[in-house]
Amino acid sequence: MLNNSYTKTINTDPCVSLLEKGYDLSYKLCIEDLNILKTFIKDQWIYRLQVEDAKLLAYIHENDIDLEDYHLISNKLKNKNIWSKVSRILPPSFEPWFSNTSFYKKLEQDFGEFSVSDEEHFGWPNFYWRIVRPNQTSDIGPLHRDSWFWKLNKSFKRPPYNFKRIKVWIAIITEPGLNGLLLEEYSHKRKDIKWSGELRDNIQKPVLHTNLSDLNPQLINRSPGEVIVFHDDLLHGGALNKGSKSRISMEFTMLVKI
């Protein structure tokens, strides 16, 4: 919950600090908007599978396979090759709808003017989703700070104004306590975390060098529709999916005008 000091901060300069802990759990999508968002994701998921394997798509329809069941058929596909980040960025038609939701307007009210990042230079905001199968370590990202990506990749598109970055993570299909996002509280203030960069998948990506025994990331329980808004320097990463469903989430980066 927001404390009084954070409420005052967010009304004056919300980018200075997202809580003392570095994140905010007060935002949530209504059920109607969550269902529409899920439809956008499923349409893109279906299209990608159709391109990859039309026979498999027929099997999905015949057996009523949904997003949360993806792990049941993923062994028939080259999962990593199919679901690169660029294949999970929602189309331009998504932004006009999403920017008119009560959730998005609440972000604008609290944080002021912002745009959404376009790191991939698509020409439209990069709202992208993730699918994490049960017990698949290859589906989750290691602990990192988002700011590291921006330090490593000078080609990331930047707006023509001074800005601060704030990350938004939305639970779409989750099983609280069994999957979701790991966060290291207060880590946005730590100066002792060591890292470097390396080229992977045609992009410079950070590598954490601080020993995991010196960190204490915690799984944040989020039900479908619930949101995590967090600081650009907060250490975070995907949690191993210990549930029975494929976990789906969506995320984007706000470039908040200073």
Image (cartoon, rainbow, N blue to C red):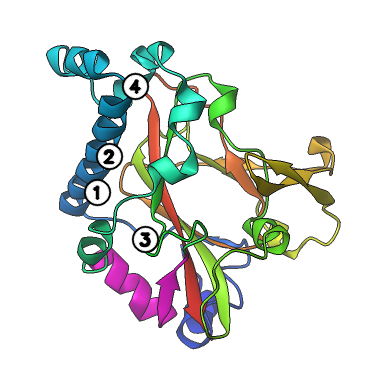
Residue sitting nearer the eye, 218 or 56: 56
- Mark 2 or mark 1, whichever is nearer to me: 2
Q: Do residues under tags 4 and 3 come within 8 Å of each other at their CB atoms? A: no
**Is tag 2's residue or tag 3's residue first in the polypeptide sequence?**
3
Image position of 77 with respect to 26: above or below: above
Callout 3 touching callout 1 (CB < 8 Å): no
Q: Which region shows up in magenta?
A: 102-117
Q: Which mark identifies residue 185?
A: none
Tell me how far mark 2 sits from mark 1, CA to CA: 11 Å
**Mark 3 residue crowding within 10 angstroms, few (<14) / some (14–19) / many (20+):** some
Is 167 positioned to the left or the right of 108 in the image?
right
Residue linked to disc 2? 44
Residue designated by label 4:
70
Badge 1 marks a residue whose secondary structure is helix
**Label 4 to label 3, Cα distance in Å?**
28 Å
Residue beneath disc 1 = 37
Characterize the magenta stretch by its predominant secondary structure.
helix
C-alpha distance separating marks 4 and 1: 18 Å
Asked whether disc 2 touches disc 1, contact meaning CB atoms under 8 Å apart, the reply is: no
